[in-house]
Amino acid sequence: MKLIDEYLKKIEKELQSEGRKIKAEEVGLVTEVKDGIVILEGLDDVSYGELIQFEQKKIGFVIDIEEFTVGAVVLGDYLSIKSGDKATALGYTLSIPVSEAILGRVVDSLGNPQDSSVKIAAKEFYPVEKVAPGVVRRIPVSLPIQTGIKAIDALIPIGRGQRELIIGDRVTGKTTLAIDTILNQKNENVICIYCAIGQKNSKVAAIIDLLKKYGALEYTILLNASASESAAMQYLAPYSATAIGEYFMDKGKDVLVIYDDLTKHAWAYREISLILRRPAGREAYPGDIFYLHSRLLERACRLNKKYGGGSLTALPIIETLEGDLSSYIPTNVISITDGQIYLETDLFNAGVRPAINVGLSVSRVGTNAQTKAIKSVSGKLKLDLAQYREMAAFSQFESELDEETKKFLNRGARITQILKQKKNQPYSLAFEVAIIWAASNGYLDELPLDKVESFETKLLSDLKMRGKSLVQRINKNKIIEKKDEEDLKKFVTENLGV
Ligand SMILES: Nc1ncnc2c1ncn2[C@@H]1O[C@H](COP(=O)(O)OP(=O)(O)O)[C@@H](O)[C@H]1O
Ligand SMILES: [Mg+2]
């Protein structure tokens, strides 16, 4: 043994003295190619996630390690790869370039620009897969992400560092809810990342236009792995988006990441797993599908001061079929997240938009993070709504209702009315507080139901015109003091025409 080592050293020395650079490389052979997945032999020392370079400079990464073979996913076009090709293990895992220059850009899962040919100038690379920060580096969620959507901020508040699922059938306003939340971060110093997985390019283009129109693209990054891209790119997308988020979080920033949607992400992974001939489980998903999403969402957190105090808030979206929350992927993601916002087709069609089912939606940590101002008006609102739901169900059978019940039904109907909100119109904190204050203090009880909307419009425009100082005070102090309450009362009663 010693002799061999000595000889090797001697040869190495001689080679180097001739001015040659030597580098050890692990080279394998392609034995099978199928739908973007490549099976290789001879790569005995690779690790999971390691990059592989094929002969034509194509890149892939290891996703499956068997006794004698290795499975890799090809990134991009795989048609030119044939069996018998050489493949070299590069010795490092997949990383994407990150820098401030990525803000306002549209990129693919590898960080390549899609909006123009200008490359993103970056000195740093962040690994796509990363172990989530441990408990010691985290602190509890205690600051809110203001969504600007009345129903959410009042009833299902979201905290910075939280994971809140948006779930519902197709066309129930899931994407709209998420995009409105981005629009509302304009002056909140939050970096937003919208990760589109398996969506139509036309839809993504519409979202880019919308963000541009509202001046929201400058603090947003769009990561697009559309339906036309390979399963590998769709599979990678949310991890890459999180890596970009982590870059900003490590700089002490607050980051909001939207994964639209994880159902299609699970499909992409199922496709890859089936091609790899992994045993299929429930709904033909592989056994590790739970781990797929938990290792992703666990990366959402709020770091403590020592690590910069940044946060990463995750809003994953799941699309259900006919409202079925108990199918495989929805139940998985519900159990991983800290709560869910459940959107319903029936409500959406009945004109309750955003179509949030308040009874089935929860936020397990957000209430700790609510601002004092919202907390002071939403406590009563929740109670009123819960009673309303209970009574509304029973009152269908009763013809004669007592006064008390009628009062609750009346109040509930008005609250439902004020929780409606047009799309792309997030409210500032003061506006949310003003309208909810009016409803929960009974000022709207006498108002005919069809007049509630016009009252709201009137109140808000009046506040914009004459109530600047009140609005500024509430937005800044995030609390309602005695004087603010008196002012609110004045504005509300005047606009009611009492
Ligand atoms: N609050 C709202 N008010 C009015 N229209 C809305 C509202 N939310 C969503 N919509 C409309 O409903 C349609 C579906 O919304 P979208 O967010 O794309 O649903 P999903 O992502 O659940 O499929 C879109 O045309 C959108 O403009
Ligand atoms: Mg959508």
Image (tube, helix red, strand yellow):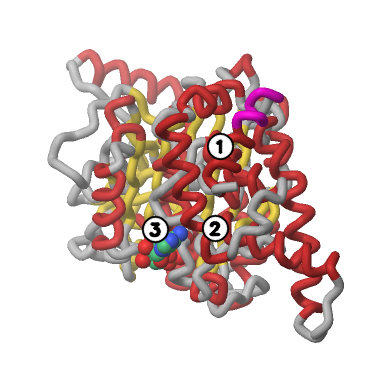
Q: Residue at x 18, y 16 (%)?
A: 19
As for residue 484 lying within the magenta part, the answer is yes
Q: Earlier in the sequence, mark 1 or mark 3?
A: 3
Q: Is residue 284 above or below residue 297?
A: below
Q: Is residue 470 visible?
A: yes
Q: In the figure, is residue 304 to the left or right of 169? A: right
Where is mark 2, residue-wise?
452
Where is mark 3, residue-wise?
197
Where is mark 1, residue-wise?
491
Q: In the figure, is residue 10 to the left or right of 243? A: left
x and y percent of residue 272 in the render?
A: 44, 66
Q: Earlier in the sequence, mark 1 or mark 2?
A: 2
x and y percent of residue 265 in the render?
A: 46, 61
What amino acid is at disc 1?
Phe
Q: Residue at x 54, y 38 (%)?
A: 146
* The residue at label 1 has a CB less than 8 Å from ligand 1: no
Residue extent of the magenta highlight? 482-487
Q: Residue at x 25, y 17 (%)?
A: 16
Can you name the residue that lies furthest to the front here? 498
